[in-house]
Amino acid sequence: MMIRGRDIVVIGIQAWDIEIGSNCKNIAEEMARFNRVLYVNSPLDRNTKKNAKTDERVAKRLRISQGLETDIEEIKPNMWNLYPKHQVESINFIPDGFLYDFFNKQRNRTLAKDIQSAIDRLNFKDVILFNDSSMFLGLYLKEFLKPKTYVYYMRDFLTKNPYWRTHGLRLEPKLIAKADVVVNNSTLYTEYGLQFNNHSYMVGQGCDVSLFNDDNHAIPVAEDLKTIPKPIIGYVGFLSGRRLDIQLLVYMAKIKKEWQIVLVGPEDDQFKASELHQIANVHFLGSRDSAVLPNYIKGFDVCMNPQLINEATIGNYPRKIDEYLAMGKPTAATATKAMDYFKETTYLATTPDEWISVVEKALSENSEELQKQRKACGLSHSWENNVNEIYKYIVAFEKGWKE
């Protein structure tokens, strides 16, 4: 399903000028291929103004608020970035309830005025409002902006974080309930949304898989892998003790001394202090530029995602699985709700012994046919396909859910 020639306003919790990647930015860029898109940064709040006044991004917003720079910048054809002119108050310290709601509505009204001003200047009509997880500043925008369609996008359990939990446990369900369409990148979030809105849908996740397409066999194996014996069981990504199961890796390395456990990525303090550094068949290769990660995946015999199961991981869509599969690699992962999405093309395990078993299976039954199935799965999860899934439900809503 494709939407063309529409006007779309995107709001979220990550500004365009953040230094890291963002689902919301990728989605907005894909939407802008055939539509006009206004990407709205969060307004400056008093605490940020006070505590980060030397940050150039804050300085830029202050210049805009003083009228010294324009509040709308063209990012590319059909796409603009809005820096809201007006500051909002920092109110998370207010106890949850009526008083918070009163002030939060004022903040919503302030932001809505800046957005409406941009909508009018850009001559946007019949707006689709796409809200990426902004449960506080997006709570009343449907009423203030009156979009043709209001979409709420959930890709994380933000309410597990103390900042969002204080008011989000009460307010996010209200926002989900009033949205016209709720889209999610996890079956767990979809089920959560369905508690408050019958139109909560799993749309999967996008990924720039072009970097991992090795159909022409043009990607060479990384040089520093060539000296490591086979088989290599590998992981690429940030090595976080909060998200990855260090004890599982220790167990695997000790039980299967003939396997080489290769870890590519920066380490947090838990990994740096772990027993893994004293085990001969565990190899830490350090941080690598994202452009060369396919060279490492190419050299792995089995790719893995040994997640811990906790509040931070249980529902998250693991983008690296798409990258592994796009290269046709046998892939083992911890069985989570999110991994149900990949159960046909990955090997899932829960206990350490199950992990040993599925990796052995992955090593023994690899075939050209299985590689083709994996590649088809990974390469299908493009941003284009992801956004088309979102469009499908927007169109269905606008047609009255008749199709």
Image: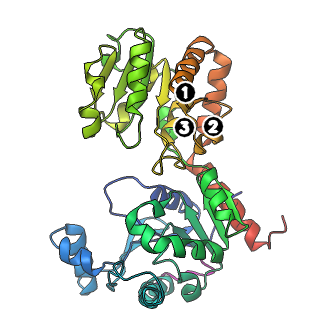
Q: Please give the name of the residue rendered at 61% of the width and 71% of the height, measured from the top-left corner.
A: 176
The image shows residue 204 at horizontal and vertical percentages of: 61, 49
Q: Earlier in the sequence, mark 1 or mark 3?
A: 3
Q: Which residue is mark 1?
A: 331
Q: Which residue is mark 2?
A: 342
Any mark on residue 322, and which?
3
Nearer-N-terminus badge (2/1):
1
Q: CA distance from mark 3 to mark 2?
A: 9 Å
Residue 320 visible in the current orientation: yes
Please tell me which residue lies in front, 80 or 390.
390
Say which of marks 1 and 3 sits in front: 1
| Closest to the observer, 174 or 38 | 174
What residue range appears in magenta? Answer: 121-127
Q: Secondary structure at mark 1?
A: strand
Q: Residues within 10 Å of mark 3 (few under 14, many from 20)?
A: many
Which quarter shows the C terminus? Answer: bottom right
Circles 2 and 1, Cβ within 8 Å, touching? The answer is yes
Answer above or below: position of 305 versus 112: above
Cα distance between the residues tagged 1 and 3: 10 Å
Magenta segment includes 122 = yes
The residue that appears at 68% across and 19% down in the rendered structure is 369
Q: Mark 2 packing: few (<14 Cα in 10 Å), some, or many (20+)? A: some
* Amino acid type, residue under disc 1 in the picture: Thr
Determine which quarter of the picture holds residue 181: bottom right
